[in-house]
């Protein structure tokens, strides 16, 4: 039939993936058995297809309509019968249904991640998977990619590779560049610890790569391991990343420590910490047991999993009550502390709350969320992707923060009463986790907040997303009967835990604020006594020296010089951050992360915390990270962050505001420039650069 073809390395009916699989088989490599659904099916389902020449809101609607047509079009006569016979001939229990288009796996444009592939598909679900993969050929991301690379979108062949699904024990990618300088060696990445791969398996994989590279030049393969057996799934040209630069901060590691065991906390602290905040980090690392260790290197916060275990462990079902008790106790102690606490009293409160909050309550809440994910992985894997909906709409302080920010945005001038309402509850927060940064309450008596609220006015502020109750009911009906009782118990616990994961930052800000106030009082006194140039210099003194001064030790002549040196070190750290994650596919104009759903087209606005710039209307806001304290006060058409996951603050709040967001996009800040035209396809988790600022 004209709708099917055998695998062959030069058949023009086959796209990149199918041809690469045929080349691997011809080279003697073990590959899964399969066949190709040809471009003829795509043309039959969408006859006379006309695609937009540029992307805008109208183009999105036009493309969506085309996908609806493709999804509802009748199958050609005899197609499903032939498909069933071919699947049966493969003798597999499940299948991989993968895009194999003209614009894939070419040395000038790999298009990795642009088009859809589905794996572990049951035989009766293959027809629906075929439509889904074909639909990705006319997605906004695909059209944008084609435009950026000067190729015709959905040009033939729009073929689909179908092969037996190979589950295996481990899988990954491997690459080899025979022209690399300094004794080139294969690079092997796996979805499990590399040490668990046997040395003989690694040698065989490396030898296979070297053989393929001798014929094709620099190559990259996708592989699956079943015991010692090696199966290859794809071959494509390899584009090696630029060598990573050395970073001087690693030289500050304690003797015997390896840089590999320490991770930069860029998700919460992408900027260097002030000496005052560095002192707080050292204090809690010495006195609090929270399961991790923390230190600062060249001013930046790092953490390691090798920390002392917390003093107590609670179950996820106990987390909500534990947080409530800790909050009530903390509020009582804050009242006792008063508006002008001593530095030591403020530090005692900070430390006493830090350990139970970060060491007991927060880990229990995270376990509660993870237990729901683990349950779905075991009992209904197809529903794992619905986790963000199931955990959305949770009543929390994040919801209240958004409501009060929206009230400011919606109010006519004067907004004073709404600003006061916001500051009453959230005034101790600031745009950064650093006591040197003024809180919202301090910022011009709320004027800044009012201006930010006005800027935040825009569409999509009310949640209109999928209903979590309906989603939960649907999943319940699909679960095995024996698992339904556990589901009914797990879901409310996980939702309560999701709320706590939003609220813990608020309580941290509450106990950090007295530390800032005490340091501000100390700085003001030292400035009055002409010991410091200005009160804020106190945050740039060595922290232990500031504690001595607060305790009554006389200031010496060196105080001014110490503060000046602290500021200079902070500025130097700003200019020399740790190396960011590799941008991955950025060289091809594609960045990939985790999407919240939705699409937006616009110009990039690089958001750097504390620079005072406000994104213009319709901007695509790109940042290393965003804090929950910032999110309600920023207006944008879409968000892109280098850090974060599908259930983290940015993704959760963006989803509830119906704001397209792609999080965990490694290298986004370095790969994009202010004013770049980009498409954010949060349905697919892709960011595609369409043109430079001047285009």
Image (cartoon, grey):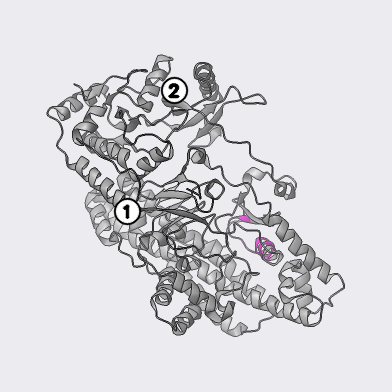
Q: Which residue in the rendered view is the most extreme toward the left?
A: 77
The one nearer the camera, 136 or 454, is 454
User: How many neighbours does mark 2 have within 10 angstroms: few (below 14), some (14-19), or many (20 or more)?
Assistant: few
When asked about the image quadrant of residue 489, the answer is: bottom left
Give residue 426's position: percent from left, percent from top.
Answer: 50, 75
Check if residue 292 falls in the magenta segment: yes
The answer to whether residue 592 is visible is: no
Vertical placement of 318 versus 692: above or below? below
Q: Is residue 485 visible?
A: yes
Residue behind mark 1: 57
Q: Which mark is residue 356?
A: none
**Which residue does the image show at 45% across and 27% down from the upper left?**
236
Which is closer to the viewer, label 1 or label 2? 1
Image quarter (top left, top right, bottom left or bottom right) of the N terminus? top left
Per the image, label 2 sits on a secondary structure element best described as strand
Most foreground residue, 547 or 527: 527
Which residue sits at x=57%, y=62%? 609
Closer-to-camera residue (198/182):
182
Which quadrant of the figure has residue 15? top left
User: Which residue matches tag 2?
Assistant: 229
Pointer 1 or 2: first along the chain: 1
Estimate the x, y position of residue 322 in percent, counting from the top left. Answer: 47, 69
Q: Residues within 10 Å of mark 1 (few under 14, many from 20)?
A: few
Q: Could you tell me residue 97's position as x and y percent?
A: 30, 32
Q: CA distance from mark 1 to mark 2?
A: 49 Å
- Mark 1 and mark 2 residues within 8 Å of each other at the beta carbon: no
x then y, percent, for residue 286 = 68, 61
Q: Which residue is more in the foreground, 315 or 371?
A: 371
* Residue 336 sits above or below residue 561 on the image: below
Q: Looking at this rendering, what residue extends furthest in the right direction?
A: 557
Direction from residue 238 to residue 573 in the image, left or right: right
Give, as a single range, the part of the protein colored magenta.
280-293
């Amino acid at each position: 039939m004209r709708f099917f073809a055998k695998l062959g390395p030069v058949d023009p009916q086959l796209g990149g993936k199918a041809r690469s699989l045929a080349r691997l088989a011809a080279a003697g490599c073990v590959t899964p058995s399969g066949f190709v659904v040809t471009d003829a099916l795509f043309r039959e389902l969408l006859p006379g297809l006309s695609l937009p020449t540029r992307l805008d809101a109208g183009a999105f609607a036009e493309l969506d309509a085309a996908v609806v047509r493709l999804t509802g079009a009748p199958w050609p006569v005899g197609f499903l019968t032939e498909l069933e016979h071919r699947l049966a001939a493969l003798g597999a229990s499940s299948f991989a249904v993968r895009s194999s288009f003209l614009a894939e796996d070419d040395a000038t444009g790999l298009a990795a991640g642009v088009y859809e592939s589905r794996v572990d598909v049951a035989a009766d679900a293959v027809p629906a998977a075929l439509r889904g993969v074909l639909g990705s050929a006319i997605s906004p991301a695909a059209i944008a990619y084609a435009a950026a690379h000067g190729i015709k979108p959905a040009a033939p062949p729009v073929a689909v590779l179908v092969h037996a699904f190979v589950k295996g024990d481990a899988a990954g990618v491997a690459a080899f560049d025979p022209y690399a300088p300094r004794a080139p060696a294969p690079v092997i990445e796996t979805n499990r610890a590399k040490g668990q791969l046997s040395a003989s398996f690694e040698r065989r994989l490396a030898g296979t790569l070297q053989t393929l590279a001798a014929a094709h030049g620099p190559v990259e393969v996708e592989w699956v391991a079943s015991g010692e057996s090696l199966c290859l799934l794809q071959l494509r040209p390899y584009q090696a990343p630029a060598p990573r630069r050395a970073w001087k901060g690693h030289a500050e590691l304690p003797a015997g420590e390896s840089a590999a065991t320490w991770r930069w906390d860029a998700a919460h602290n992408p900027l260097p910490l002030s000496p005052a905040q560095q002192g707080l980090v050292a204090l809690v690392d010495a006195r609090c047991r929270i399961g991790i260790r923390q230190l600062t290197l060249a001013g930046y916060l790092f953490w390691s999993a090798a920390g002392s275990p917390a003093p107590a462990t609670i179950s996820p079902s106990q987390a909500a009550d534990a947080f409530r008790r800790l909050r009530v106790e903390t509020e009582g102690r804050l009242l006792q502390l008063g508006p002008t606490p001593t530095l030591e009293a403020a530090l005692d409160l900070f430390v006493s709350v830090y350990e139970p909050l970060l060491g007991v309550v927060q880990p229990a809440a995270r376990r509660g969320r993870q237990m729901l994910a683990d349950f779905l992985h075991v009992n209904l894997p197809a529903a794992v992707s619905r986790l963000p909906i199931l955990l959305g709409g949770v009543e929390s302080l994040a919801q209240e923060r958004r409501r009060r920010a929206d009230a400011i945005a919606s109010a006519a001038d004067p907004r004073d009463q709404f600003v006061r309402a916001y500051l009453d509850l959230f005034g101790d927060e600031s745009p950064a986790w650093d006591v040197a940064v003024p809180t919202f309450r301090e910022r011009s008596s709320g004027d800044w907040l009012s201006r930010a609220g006005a800027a935040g006015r825009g569409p999509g502020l009310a949640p209109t997303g999928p209903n979590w109750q309906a989603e939960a009911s649907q999943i319940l009906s699909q679960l095995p009967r024996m698992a339904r009782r556990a589901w009914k118990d797990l879901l409310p616990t996980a939702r309560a835990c999701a709320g706590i994961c939003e609220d813990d930052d608020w309580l941290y800000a509450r106990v950090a604020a007295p530390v800032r106030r005490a340091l501000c009082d100390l700085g003001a006194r030292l400035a009055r006594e002409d010991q410091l140039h200005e009160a804020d210099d106190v945050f740039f003194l060595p922290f232990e020296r500031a504690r001595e001064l607060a305790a009554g030790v006389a200031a010496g002549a060196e105080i001014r010089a110490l503060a000046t040196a602290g500021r200079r070190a902070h500025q130097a750290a700003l200019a020399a951050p740790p190396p960011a994650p590799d941008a991955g596919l950025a060289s091809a104009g594609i960045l990939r992360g985790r999407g919240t759903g939705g699409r937006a087209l616009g110009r990039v606005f690089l958001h750097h915390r504390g620079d005072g710039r406000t994104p213009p209307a319709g901007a695509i806001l790109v940042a290393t990270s965003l804090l929950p304290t910032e999110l309600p006060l920023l207006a944008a058409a879409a968000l892109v962050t280098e850090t974060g996951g599908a259930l983290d603050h940015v993704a959760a709040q963006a989803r509830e505001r119906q704001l397209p967001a792609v999080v965990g996009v490694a290298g986004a800040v370095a790969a994009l420039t202010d004013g770049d035209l980009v498409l954010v396809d949060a349905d697919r988790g892709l960011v595609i650069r369409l043109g430079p600022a001047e285009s």
